[in-house]
Image (tube, grey):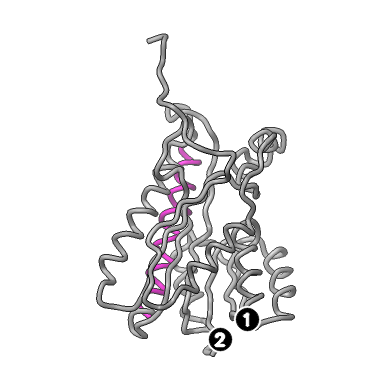
Amino acid sequence: MSQIAFITGVTSGFGAACARQFAAHGWHLIVCGRRQDRLEALRAELAATVPVHAVALDVRDEAAVNAAVAALPADFAEVDLLVNNAGLALGLEPAHQCPMDDWQRMVDTNIKGLLYCTRAILPGMVARNRGHIVNIGSVAGNHPYPGGNVYGATKAFVRQFSLNLRADLLGTRVRVTNIEPGMAETEFSLVRFKGESGPSAKVYAGTQPLQAEDIADIVYWTATRPAHVNINTLEVMPVCQAFAPFAISRTG
C-alpha cells in the first residue's frame, strides 16, 4: 500500500524538491502552497507519476487548514507523513529597526502555520498509531546571528516544539523529526530581501551552499528509516559554512 505525504510550501525550494523526491519513490502526495500557478504546474508534473491532491493554502489561516484537512478525499485522508516546510525569513535589520509586520508574518507562518497543520493532522496519526511529522527548522534556531532576531526565535520554537511532541507521543508509534538546514540556495534570500536579487545573490557568492535536493534527500531518508527508529534532530550545513567566534564590540 502506497504511503501518503502532506507537504506544505511546495511552490518553491525545499517543498518542491521534497514533493519530487517522494513522487519518484511512489508516494501519494497532498501538496499545499499559496501560489496557484506554481501549485498547478507541480501537480500536473507529478500527477504523471503518482496520485496528487493539490490544495491552494496559506498555512497562516487556521480555518482554511482545518477545512483542507477535513475535505481530503478518502484516498488521501490517512496521512502517513506531514512535512511542515512552509516558512520564511524577512529582513536583516536589528531588532529595534525591524518592521513589526515582518516579525508578525514570520511568527504567523513559521510558528502558527506549523501548529495549525500539526494539530489538524496529528489526531488521525495517533488514532491509527502510525505516522511521522517532519518539521523544517534551521541552524538559526541554535546559533544566533545579527539580524536573525525573530526568524531565529521562530526556529528555536520549532526545535523545542518537536522535542515536546516526541515527549507527548511516547507510547505511540508516531515519529517526530526536526531537520535544521544551514545555508541553502533556494528562494530563501530572495524572500528575505523582498525580491531584491542583488543582496540575495551576494549571500551565495563564492560559496557552494546546500541545494533544495540535498534537504529533500535527507527528509526522505529520515522518513524511510525502520518504524522503530526516530531521528530526533538533524542539523546540516554545507562544508563552506561553520561557526563564527564570539563577537566583541570595541566601541562601547
| Magenta-drawn stretch contains 104 | yes
Give me the residue at 52% from left, 68% from top: 221
User: Which x, y percent locates residue 115?
Assistant: 39, 62
What kind of residue is marked 2?
Ser
Image quarter of residue 111? bottom left
User: Which x, y percent locates residue 184?
Assistant: 60, 47
Q: CA distance from mark 1 to mark 2?
A: 7 Å
Q: Secondary structure at mark 1?
A: loop
What kind of residue is marked 1?
Gly
Say which quadrant the N terminus sits in.
bottom right
The stretch of residues the image draws in magenta is 100-124
User: Which x, y percent locates residue 123?
Assistant: 35, 77
**On the image, numbered disc 1 is attached to which residue?**
26
Callout 2 crowding tier (Cα within 10 Å): few <14, some 14–19, many ≥20 = few
Callout 1 crowding tier (Cα within 10 Å): few <14, some 14–19, many ≥20 = some
Q: Is residue 107 left or right of residue 49?
A: left
**On the image, numbered disc 2 is attached to which residue?**
2
Query: Along the line of sight, which residue is nearer the eye, 125 or 34?
Result: 125
Image quarter of residue 197? top right
Q: Secondary structure at mark 2?
A: loop
Which is nearer the N-term, disc 1 or disc 2?
Answer: 2
- Contact flag, marks 1 and 2 (Cβ < 8 Å): yes
| Magenta-drawn stretch contains 157 | no
Above or below, comparing residue 76 to residue 132 in the picture: below
User: Which x, y percent locates residue 4?
Assistant: 53, 80
